[in-house]
Image (tube, grey):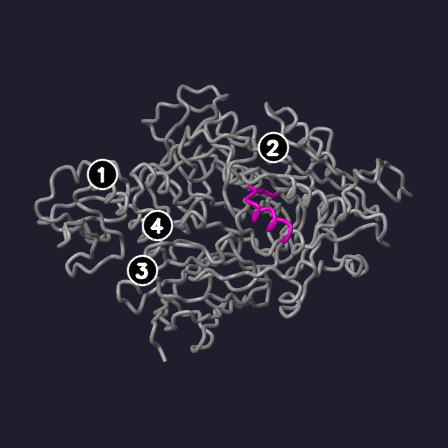
Amino acid sequence: MATQRRWVLLLGINFYLRKDQQLKGAVNDVKIFKEWFEDARDPPIIKALIADTNGDNHQTQPPGAPETWPTYENVTSELKRITKDASPGDLVHIHYSGHGTRKKISEEYRAIDGGDAALVLFDPETTTKAKYLRGFDLASLLDEMVENDLRVSVVLDCCSSGGISRGATETRGIPWDDVTAAESPLNVAQQRREIDDEPNFRDGEADHHWLLRPDNYTLIASCGPYELAKEIRAGQQFHGALSWHFLEAMWYLSESSMDHTYGNIIRRIRARFRMLTQLSTQNPMMMGTDSIFIGQERTRREKQATCEVIGSTPEGRIILNVGLIHGVQEDDQYTVHIPNNVATKTPQFTIKVVHGASSEAEEEILQSSRSSPTRIEVGLSATLTRLHKPKAQVQLFPGANTQWKEASRESAWVQTVPHDEPLSVDVPGIAIILNDRFEYEIVSVGTHESMNMPCVPSQDGDAISKVVSLLEHLAKFMLTESLENRGNGVMAQNDFRIELPGIGLSSAIPCTMKAKDQDIVPFVFHNNTAHYLYFTILNLRPLREITKIPKDWEYKVVEPRSSLTTKIRMSVPKLIKDNGGSRATTIFKFIVTTKPIRVSGLTLPDPWASSDATRGESARTLDSLLQGQSVDEIKEERPVARGESDTLSWTCYSIYMDVNLYIN
């Protein structure tokens, strides 16, 4: 069996022709990552291209040989070389530190161009000594790697906002330059890559960020659209904020019992940024596949983190970055994990929610906790371990044995009830029956209508455990379906409008619409405020899967007083068609906020594709219910950036779409 090789391409650019655009920490980023990789037990194949400054006010090019510069030709040639020389299954990691830029362009131009953002590379032959590597071209080069079955990850420590320095804050973005753009034509040999919609409910348009869509690889961007990527001083040197905290997160994970996944890394970084005034408006994003960081091994020593500690109150309560938006309620319990290098009696302690706000929750340490932490560090990971009450009651069939109760006793999500006992009115109810095919089937209480969940043969030795796993999955689905506006900070309806086909402008949601199978339905989101709005669409599909639209992005950003169109293809699932059905109802849940809030933890896999999963696998999925959340509301005194709201408001609305095969 061929040995899996690892390839690393590090790009750092401090030198730009205009002195006021030069950076201080990009080359330092390359140096510390190069040192980190070289110190590994099995170092990867490393290539570093840098453009540094030398202190000369009249400098016209970086020091060093031309083949060591991050020019357009050198960078693209190196990416093509790796694609050619690497073998299927090899790991490729690309890290860019430097300036990014973005041009605000029309929807018509975006459709032709395929992207409106670029990395600003050095080039000795152009007028401005710079050349753009456009997002489209970079995406095309990465696509070739993925097509060759390479496992690719990309970190971009630069702006996508086109922001410039304000005051003493160093940022990694410069304005779009038409002269540089004219000397950086889009590579027409790589025509606009096709974005084939998946058969069901895929966003039909390209998002304006660095790449068209991160398909089958991992992309970590230093900040969201319209935000600034900053440089910070670390000791005696400058570094990119993302790059420095990326390495800090790697150290933290090494000292704790968490896997070195990109998801764990980015959650640690977000929690740290959340509490730092200088970085509080920078929201790193992860898109694509959550994989293990290059060169690391999966340990499976602990369950996946649900959320992180982002601070504490004067009363000693701990603040977690999950809240009402994510379905958190008072008396839910979490376990906080302590790194191995911190001296405590046990490596964890338990906390309980005592106050839930829109996007965060205050917790108190339970008196029964055996652990006595001396310091509550920002960024500690926490795992949801107990809910204040089950999310679903399950009425058992007549003759169900005690194994059902024992199997569900450890579940925080469901509570079984004998068939002859009444169900509580404040917890949703479902039922299990033994159907004519001697299968356990999940149905509605009373009417016994199918709940569109897989059936499990009763003869299966693990049948009860599998059914409980499916019940937990359904309970999670029902929790997300029931999310509603509650608590303080609910957004006013006139702050935005959603234009729906056939019924004009409306924010009086929930509402019901009809569509034909394979119709592409446009949703036009109008931002009526003077600040940015962020929205995510959760697609609650008929067969109990929950996806984000678009699936690889945490949220979409709508500029002040502007609109954004999202197109979604409707479909009746094939399984329903194959069983003679002609219609299905899907729910689109819009979560709209005035600050970036990540709700990826509310997604659910397709239970029909994973119905053979064991209880343990399902439990790991359940632990990710609120995984990936990051709260960006800052309590510290600081100036509010232009276009940024100074408070967090939110709302949650639903659209029910009745999709039919035979609508005329």
- Specify the amino acid type for callout 1: Asp
Density class for disc 3 (Cα within 10 Å; few <14, some 14-19, many ≥20) is: few
Residue at numbered disc 4: 609
Q: Which residue lies furthest to the front in this view?
A: 1
For residue 637, which quarter of the picture?
top right
Residue at numbered disc 2: 247
- Specify the amino acid type for callout 2: Leu
| Element carrying mark 2 | helix
Q: Distance between the residues labelled 2 and 4?
A: 36 Å
> In x, y percent, where is residue 606?
36, 51
- Specify the amino acid type for callout 4: Ala
Among the two numbered marks 3 and 2 on one chain, the one whose residue lies closer to the N terminus: 2
Q: How far apart are marks 3 and 2 (CA)?
A: 45 Å
Q: Find out whether residue 625 is within the magenta segment.
A: no
Among the two numbered marks 2 and 1 on one chain, the one whose residue lies closer to the N terminus: 2
Among the two numbered marks 2 and 4 on one chain, the one whose residue lies closer to the N terminus: 2
The answer to whether marks 3 and 2 mark residues whose Cβ atoms lie closer than 8 Å is no
Residue found at x 64% / y 29%: 37
Residue at numbered disc 1: 462
Q: Distance between the residues labelled 4 and 1?
A: 18 Å
